[in-house]
Amino acid sequence: MQLYNTLSAEERAQLIDEAGKQRLTLSFYAYAKIENPKKFRDELFIAWNALDALGRIYVAHEGINAQMSIPAENIDGFRETLEVYDFMKGIRLNVAVEQDDHSFLKLTIKVRHKIVADGLNDETFDVTNKGIHLKAQEFNNLLEDPNTIVVDFRNHYESEVGHFEGAITPDVETFRESLPIINEQLQDFKEDKNLLMYCTGGIRCEKASAYFKHQGFKNVYQLEGGIIEYTRQIKEENIESKFIGKNFVFDHRLGERITDDIVSQCHQCGKPCDNHTNCANDACHLLFIQCDDCKGAMENCCSTECLEITHLPLADQVKLRKGKEVGNKVFRKGKSDALTFKNSGDLPAKPLAKAETKNIRQKISVKKVLVGKAEHYYTKSKIAQFLIENKELSVGDKVLISGPTTGDQELTITEMFANGGSCENAKEGDQVTFETPFRIRLSDKLYKILGS
């Protein structure tokens, strides 16, 4: 009986592309008393693997925390696997703001000591004695109350690219660090202030609200469903967004845009930017913010030292990594002396700029023509495949590849292949391939730019 992954991420991505079916990225959590987490884990793996469900899931004696990708056609069957357990009947699934078929490429279910590490060893602490849940409009209303203190219980690299106006944003890398820091700062406000808190999907605030009630705070509130559910509600109910910028997410997208405001800057040049990247040096893999210009100049590296290492033969790079610690001790989150413009925990009073993707759409909206749609992306060779459905495409044409996750990417075609051979021109019905320095998705469209 299969209880582990048998395919690599690259093989899984290819199968997803070949299937051509829509997938849903979603998350959920539940605090509950689970007697046998290992047995629970194995039951979930068997049920979810049969539904082609992928994701990163943690289970513990205190409950479950899941971020997943599910085939849209299997969502009802997936809900049925949850309903088997009383504590997950009717559970809310937080569906991502932006969808990407490649958000997760493996099904990983791990048994942990806790689903949210909190550093607490207090047996009297009851995680189910939580604060009052607020919907989007209720949250906005309480934000306007001068008697309210709002706290972001995410990490510094999350709040840096997006946050609620006026929020306290602790300069921490883990949730467990934030609890004592905020508790110490707010000791004088236990009785008379509204303590309002939020996180990505609600799971950290669920525990934080219970913790602060345990510490004696009287008026404790949390954003129900976190930023993800808040965004869904403000869009459906036409509510003003008090959240500005991007919501950081823990899959390869690294962010979902909520508003067009850019509240952070490139860590290398200081230009307004909110795109995270991981350093291309595998011995570093630092998560930091990097604009397109610095990305090109530094080749996705955080420092000249890392850039030099990536130019070494692979065997030499492996030797340099040998003996180094792995995991979170290597995958640092935006803390490096090489990052001149990293201002961890020090957010600007107002947005630095508006998102460039919106401006690009406005600029070329009447100067482009739809040519075709994406069919496949060959990860190792960085080759994109499109089906030409309209007009013609030629070497030398300037094109725009556009999609909800890819954004708007412009390039000029310098070499192209159609129907198995090199060509200068492609016509309707041809399958064409050409190199792109970025991943494309099945939802992407190919446009020819007619003028500048």
Image (tube, helix red, strand yellow):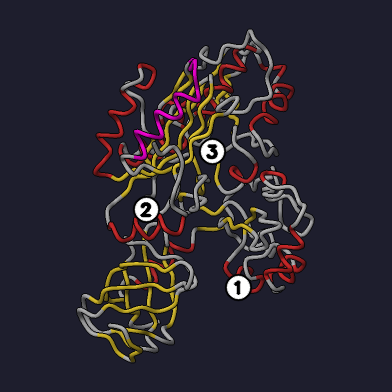
Q: Name the residue under label 1.
A: 296
Front residue (pair 273, 438) = 438
- The amino acid beneath tag 3 is Phe
Q: Is disc 2 placed on a helix, strand or loop? A: loop
- The amino acid beneath tag 2 is Asp
> Can you say which quadrant of the picture contains the C terminus?
bottom left
Q: In the rendered view, would you say 427 is above or below 223? A: below
Front residue (pair 248, 332) = 332
Residue 434 placement, left or right of 76: right
> Can you say which quadrant of the picture contains the N terminus?
top left
Which is more N-terminal, label 2 or label 3?
2
Q: Can residue 169 be seen in this view?
A: yes
Q: Which of marks 3 and 2 is in front?
A: 2
Front residue (pair 227, 46) = 46
Q: In the rendered view, would you say 80 is above or below 418? A: above
Q: Where is residue 34 in the image (x, y as percent from the top left)?
A: 48, 17
Residue at left offset 68%, top offset 30%: 178
Residue at left offset 66%, top offset 59%: 282
Residue 85 placement, left or right of 171: left
Q: Name the residue under label 2.
A: 101
Magenta-highlighted residues: 33-49
Task: Judge the density around disc 3: few (<14), some (14-19), many (≥20) Cα neighbours within 10 Å.
Answer: many
Which is more N-terminal, label 1 or label 3?
3
The numbered disc on residue 164 is 3
> Is residue 391 a member of the stretch shown in magenta?
no
